[in-house]
Image (cartoon, helix red, strand yellow):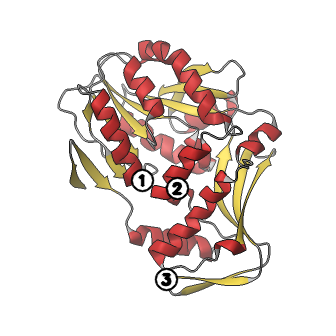
């Protein structure tokens, strides 16, 4: 664990190395079907594009969740209690964080865990100016792995993990249980987790959110190939690949692919990978939940749902979990 000065706060650097990226990519491209990990979407440009996605008219998730937080944050703060150490997985721009920190009574510290350095530093600097008494303890790292938390100067009554945005839905059920289990260990016996979940609804509404008319989501997906070209010396031809996102009713999830438009061979770090015309690389899942399905997932990780909040249309929900 390296602590890097990021005045006026200190940044704990647990960021995946180039070797981590290379190993994950080579393993994914060697498999059948080919896969690329969605966690590597978020370089500087990827983070910028995702923020642009959240402003597209088809992408209801951020808009609805922000409205839900604005409506329910006071009640959430009452349930959570005072003097908490907020730990956020995948902090992004910090818009949702601001609403939560503003509502909580005397929060002790804020630890965002983010894989994008630019998004992390920018968000923390803005929040530090607004919430001076709250100690900022950012961690640059992959939140899908166990994270040792920095110790705040003031003792917190409990840890609250904040995981908005339905990011949990990007994981397979097995991966989600693994992450929730690690989350249970992080919060400890007195802690809690506030998790955003995208709920089941009209398939056409869901599918449109991942295929916006402006093509921002497509640019976001293909930016992963730009990153691999830059950081791993790959030679992906972006004109020869295309974004595709499809809702699968049987599994209740969006499946996002990068499709090869022709037969071709791509080199990554000196290793060649053949693609057939129409061959798909799986790059992301986006699960949509029912209350029963989410409660069962949490239970497999030793957690229970103690309270929940939905928007008026039941499109999106926030669930408060505690150790079972």
Asked if the residue at tag 1 contacts the one at tag 3, i.e. Cβ–Cβ closer than 8 Å, the answer is no
Disc 3 or 2, which lies upstream in sequence? 2
How crowded pointer 3 is (Cα within 10 Å; few <14, some 14-19, many 20+) is rated as some
Earlier in the chain: of badge 3 and badge 1, it is: 1
Foreground disc of the pair 3, 2: 2
Which residue is found at the position 22% from the left and 37% from the top? 151
Q: Residue at x 69, y 56 (%)?
A: 256
Q: Residue under circle 2?
A: 46
Asked if the residue at tag 2 contacts the one at tag 3, i.e. Cβ–Cβ closer than 8 Å, the answer is no
Looking at the image, which is closer to me, 6 or 186? 6
Return the residue nearer the eye: 143 or 110: 110
For disc 1, the marked residue is 116
* Mark 3 or mark 1, whichever is nearer to me: 1
Label 1: few (<14), some or many (≥20) within 10 Å? Answer: many
Q: CA distance from mark 3 to mark 1?
A: 23 Å
Q: Secondary structure at mark 1?
A: loop
Secondary structure found at label 2: helix
Asked which quadrant contains residue 136, the reply is top left
Q: Residue furthest front?
A: 214
Element at label 3: loop
Quadrant of the snapshot with the N terminus: bottom left
Q: Earlier in the sequence, mark 2 or mark 1?
A: 2
Q: Residue furthest left?
A: 153
- The correct choice, above or below, for 198 with respect to 18 in the image is above
Say if mark 2 contacts mark 1, CB within 8 Å. yes
Residue 57 position within the rendered picture, expressed as x and y whole percent measured from the top left? 69, 37
The percent position of residue 262, horizontal first and vertical second, equals 77, 79
**Residue at image mark 3:** 269
């Amino acid at each position: 664990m390296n602590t890097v000065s990021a005045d006026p706060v200190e940044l704990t650097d647990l960021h995946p190395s180039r070797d981590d990226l290379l190993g994950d990519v080579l393993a994914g491209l060697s498999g059948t079907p080919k896969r690329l990990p969605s966690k590597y979407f978020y370089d500087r440009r990827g983070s910028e594009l995702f923020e642009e996605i959240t402003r597209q008219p088809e992408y209801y998730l951020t808009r609805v969740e922000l409205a839900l937080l604005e409506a329910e944050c006071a009640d959430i703060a009452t349930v959570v209690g005072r003097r908490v150490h907020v730990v956020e997985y995948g902090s992004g721009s910090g818009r949702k964080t601001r609403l939560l920190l503003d509502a909580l009574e005397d929060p002790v510290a804020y630890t965002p865990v983010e894989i994008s350095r630019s998004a992390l530093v920018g968000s923390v600097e803005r929040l530090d100016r607004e919430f001076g008494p709250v100690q900022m303890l950012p961690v640059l790292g992959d939140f899908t792995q166990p994270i040792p938390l920095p110790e705040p100067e003031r003792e917190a009554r409990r840890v609250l993990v904040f995981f908005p945005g339905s990011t949990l839905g990007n994981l397979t059920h097995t991966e989600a249980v693994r992450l929730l289990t690690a989350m249970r260990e992080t919060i400890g016996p007195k802690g809690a987790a506030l998790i955003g979940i995208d709920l089941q609804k009209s398939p056409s509404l869901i599918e449109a959110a991942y295929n916006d008319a402006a093509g921002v989501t497509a640019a976001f997906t293909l930016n992963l190939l730009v990153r691999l070209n830059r950081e791993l010396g790959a030679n992906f031809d972006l004109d020869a690949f295309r974004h595709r996102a499809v809702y699968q009713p049987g599994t209740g999830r969006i499946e996002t692919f990068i499709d090869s438009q022709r037969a071709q061979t791509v080199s990554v770090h000196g290793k060649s990978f053949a693609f057939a015309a129409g061959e798909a690389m799986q790059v992301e899942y986006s699960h949509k939940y029912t209350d029963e399905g989410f409660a069962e997932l949490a239970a497999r990780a030793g957690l229970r749902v103690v309270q929940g909040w939905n928007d008026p249309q039941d499109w999106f929900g926030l669930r408060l979990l505690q150790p079972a």
